[in-house]
């Protein structure tokens, strides 16, 4: 058996000197590196894993399926509105599609185990710390914060300052947390659930998979993410890693299907791409705005049309940890984003 460093050296040399590897070869590499890293975690391997995920993502984008369709809505009868709540075992691609077409979203209790969620929240705290210490010129914990450099065609990843200002850190900038995140996704069977939903292999991005820490002082603003992503075929997984919605900021949502984009920048809307409170309340109509209480590991899925915002109140006392993870179909991937295979 080759040592991992021999494998890595061969791989690095290979990717420089040969034609791009096929998706099959890259998948195999991903599986090998992941299983080695499960046995003993290594920053160099976690960095390499992100690079291979990026290459595989690029390969998948080369081969979109324009004829692909979302899963047909179906499966078992939906839980009652306004917020259809599933156990992890009873959410399928078909029931998810049915829930999104009826209520705009699907809520899942315990999508990942509580202890994994809590460990991810600790990882986020470590990544934020490593970024702060790096900002002060100090040595940092290897692998908790390293800015990912996508292929040259994408240029520099923009907006890290405002992502930071908004309480976020790109998952691709933390090889260590990214590894734990993908492991949790693997255990939850997410890739096949989401690929089944999209009708194509689910791909995420460097630009829009964000580790979040929301302090009670953050004020949310109503929005639909499709407003700034353009025409996409997407599914967002918003995964709570700490209890929120009561003692810590959660999400305020309008749990109904909205088929188009609401007017932005009117009335008291704080920014050009955001939606005024009275517009959002109007859209919610008799359903009302809902602020679910999430436990660590609970999740909500929704797409680019869904109306939501960070839900905070002045009386909240704790920060909230979460992952905002947008999956895309290769046939509906934002052109400026750098892909990562799931
Ligand atoms: O985490 C938040 O508070 C905002 C999340 C969000 O806007 C999203 O997941 O699209
Ligand atoms: Fe959003």
Image: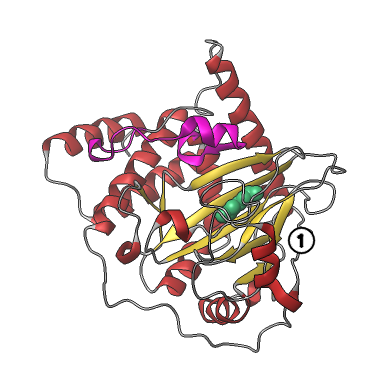
State yes or no: residue 163 in magenta: yes
In this view, 110 is above or below 128:
below
Q: Which residue is mark 1?
A: 291
Judging from the image, the colouring scheme is secondary structure
State yes or no: residue 342 in magenta: no
Asked whether residue 246 is in view, the answer is: yes
- Given the current orientation, which residue lies at the most extreme front position? 267
Give the percent coordinates (x, y) of residue 22: 20, 54
Left or right of 30, for residue 188: right
Q: Quadrant of residue 83?
A: bottom right
Q: Nearer the viewer, residue 262 or 109?
A: 262
Q: Nearer the viewer, residue 29 or 283?
A: 283
In this view, 276 is above or below 41:
below
Residue visible at 64% across and 73% down in the picture = 89
Q: Nearer the viewer, residue 35 or 328?
A: 328
The secondary element bearing badge 1 is classed as loop
Q: Residues within 10 Å of mark 1 (few under 14, many from 20)?
A: many
Q: Quadrant of residue 47?
A: top left
| Quadrant (top left/top right/bottom left/bottom right) for the N terminus | top left
Give the percent coordinates (x, y) of residue 7: 29, 36
Residue visible at 56% across and 82% down in the picture = 98
Q: Nearer the viewer, residue 342 or 217?
A: 217
Left or right of 259, for residue 250: right
Residues shaded magenta:
149-174
In this view, 159 is above or below 304:
above
């Amino acid at each position: 058996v080759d040592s991992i460093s021999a494998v890595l050296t061969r791989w690095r040399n290979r990717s420089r000197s040969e034609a791009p590897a096929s998706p099959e070869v890259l998948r195999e590499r991903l599986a090998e590196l992941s299983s080695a890293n499960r046995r003993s975690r290594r920053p160099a391997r976690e960095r390499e894993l992100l690079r291979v995920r990026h290459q595989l993502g690029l390969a998948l984008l080369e081969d979109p399926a324009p004829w692909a369709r979302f899963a047909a809505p179906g499966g078992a009868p939906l839980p009652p509105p306004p917020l259809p709540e599933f156990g992890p075992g009873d959410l399928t691609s078909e029931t998810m599609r049915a829930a999104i077409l009826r209520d705009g979203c699907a809520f899942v209790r315990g999508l990942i185990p509580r202890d994994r969620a809590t460990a991810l929240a600790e990882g986020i705290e470590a990544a934020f710390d490593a970024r702060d210490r790096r900002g002060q010129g100090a040595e940092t914990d290897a692998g908790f914060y390293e800015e990912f450099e996508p292929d040259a065609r994408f240029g520099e990843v923009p907006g890290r300052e405002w992502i930071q200002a908004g309480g976020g850190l790109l998952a691709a900038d933390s090889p260590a947390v990214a590894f734990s995140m993908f492991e949790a996704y693997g255990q939850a069977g997410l890739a096949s659930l989401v690929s089944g939903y999209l009708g194509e292999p689910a791909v995420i991005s460097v630009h829009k998979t964000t580790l979040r820490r929301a302090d009670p002082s953050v004020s949310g603003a109503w929005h639909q993410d499709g407003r700034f992503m353009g025409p996409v075929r997407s599914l967002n997984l918003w995964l709570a890693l700490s209890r929120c919605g009561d003692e810590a900021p959660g999400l305020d949502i309008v749990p109904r299907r909205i088929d188009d984009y609401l007017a932005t920048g009117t009335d008291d809307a704080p920014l050009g791409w955001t939606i005024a409170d009275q517009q959002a309340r109007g859209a919610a109509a008799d359903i009302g705005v809902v602020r679910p209480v999430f436990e660590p590991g609970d999740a909500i899925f929704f797409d680019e049309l869904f109306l939501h915002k960070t839900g905070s109140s002045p009386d909240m006392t704790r920060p909230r940890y979460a992952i905002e993870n947008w999956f895309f179909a290769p046939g509906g991937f934002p052109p400026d984003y750098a892909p990562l295979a799931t």
